[in-house]
Structure formats: C-alpha cells, structure tokens
Amino acid sequence: MQEILDRVKAILLKPVDTWPVIKSEAKTEKQIYTEYLMILAAVPLVAGFLGQWLFGYGLPFFRGISWMVVAYALSLVGVFVMAKIVDALAPSFQGQKSSINSLKLVAYSMTASWVIGVVAIIPSLAPLQILGLYSIYLFYVGLPHLMECPADKTLVYTIAVLIIAIVVFAIIGAISASIVGLSMMSGYR
C-alpha cells in the first residue's frame, strides 16, 4: 500500500520528474492493473456509493452495489480502450507506438480524478471533483515522455485524446446506467 501512496504523491506533486521513472519501470499490463489501476479506480465509485447510501439520497442498497460493480468494470474497460486509442494515435502525432507505455500514460494520468473522487463520500463536496481535471495536465506532461511525441505535437495530441475520452466515457456511463436500469426493471433490489 505504501508503494501506491508514494506513486500517487509523486505523480500528483512531481509529474515532470515522475514520468521518466514510470517509463523506465518494467511493469506488465497485468501489474499496472492489479497493483495500481484496480485499486485507485475503485476509490470514487466506493466513495460515491457510500455517500449516496449513507446520506439518505434514496439509493437502494442493491441498486447502488450493482451500479458500483458495473461502473467499476466499465471504468477498467475504458482505461483499456483509451490506452489502445492513445497507442493507435501515436504515429499521427509523430510519436512512438507502445501498448505498455500508452497504458501507463492513461492509468497514471487518471490518478488525480480517482483520488479526488474520495470527496464523493460527502455529497455536498462533489463540486470539488472538478479538481480531477488535473488529470488532463498529467496526461499532457506524460505524453512526450511515454509516447515520445515532439513538444509541438503534445497539445494537439492531448486535445484529440481528450475529445475521444469524453465520447468513450459518455458511452460507458450510458451503458452503466442502462445495465443498472435493466437490473431494476427485472426486480433486482
């Protein structure tokens, strides 16, 4: 657990120094998922569920659990999809394709949005989640290190990925809502 906390602190407070370290690490996709991504991706979802359920906003327990499980699985799929997109776009921005580096970039750059998601445990603090936009900056800073794109292409590459990410995660959100909605219609409570 200390390793995760150290990485979170480093990527949030010293991203310029941390991206080269991340690039040099010999981690597999499985290790990135199991040792970092799967843990941090759960933070905003668990906090959101607890906040809605504990503070009496009328969220039925089993509906909340089903939403959390579906949203969690789809968020992990979303990271995978975005990593593949980042990798596929690399040559268009004079970058180097690397499936492992694109996964590292997407996974670690999302740290800010996952960590700030803890405020969802107190629904009135939800507006603070805007601070998760720092993840865009983390992506921007990490892009030239991990995908080796030239500095003059980094901003456009970041904007292209951001637009695609909005679409991908909107689709994921709609899928999540429809699956949970279907479970409610079938009488699962």
Image (cartoon, rainbow, N blue to C red):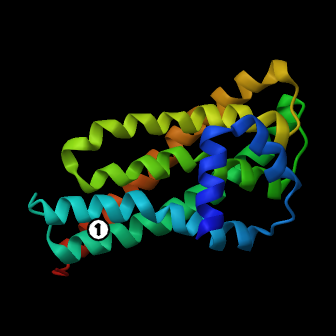
Looking at the picture, tell me which residue is in the foreground, 36 or 186.
36
Pointer 1: residues within 10 angstroms few (<14), some, or many (20+)?
A: many
Q: Mark 1 points at which residue?
A: 180
Residue 29, placed above or below residue 153: below
* Location of residue 180 with respect to 18 vertically, above or below: below
Q: Pick the quarter of the image with the C terminus.
A: bottom left
Above or below: residue 139 compared with residue 85 = above
Give the quarter of the figure containing the N terminus.
bottom right
Residue at screen point 71% across, 47% down: 85
Rendered residue at 40%/69% (across/down): 70
Measuring 79% from the left and 47% from the top, which residue is drawn there?
A: 87
Q: Nearer the viewer, residue 2 or 146?
A: 2
Name the secondary structure under disc 1: helix
The location of residue 96, given as percent across then percent down, is 91, 42
The residue type indicated by label 1 comes to: Val
Report the number of numbered marks.
1
Horizontally, residue 95 falls left or right of residue 188, namely right
Give residue 170's position: percent from left, percent from top: 44, 45
Measured from the top left, where is residue 166 in percent x and y?
50, 39
* Residue drawn at x 57%, y 32% as measured from the top left: 163
Q: In which quarter of the image is residue 64?
A: bottom left
Q: Percent x, y for residue 12?
A: 60, 42
Q: Would you identify the image quadrant in which residue 151 lies?
A: top right
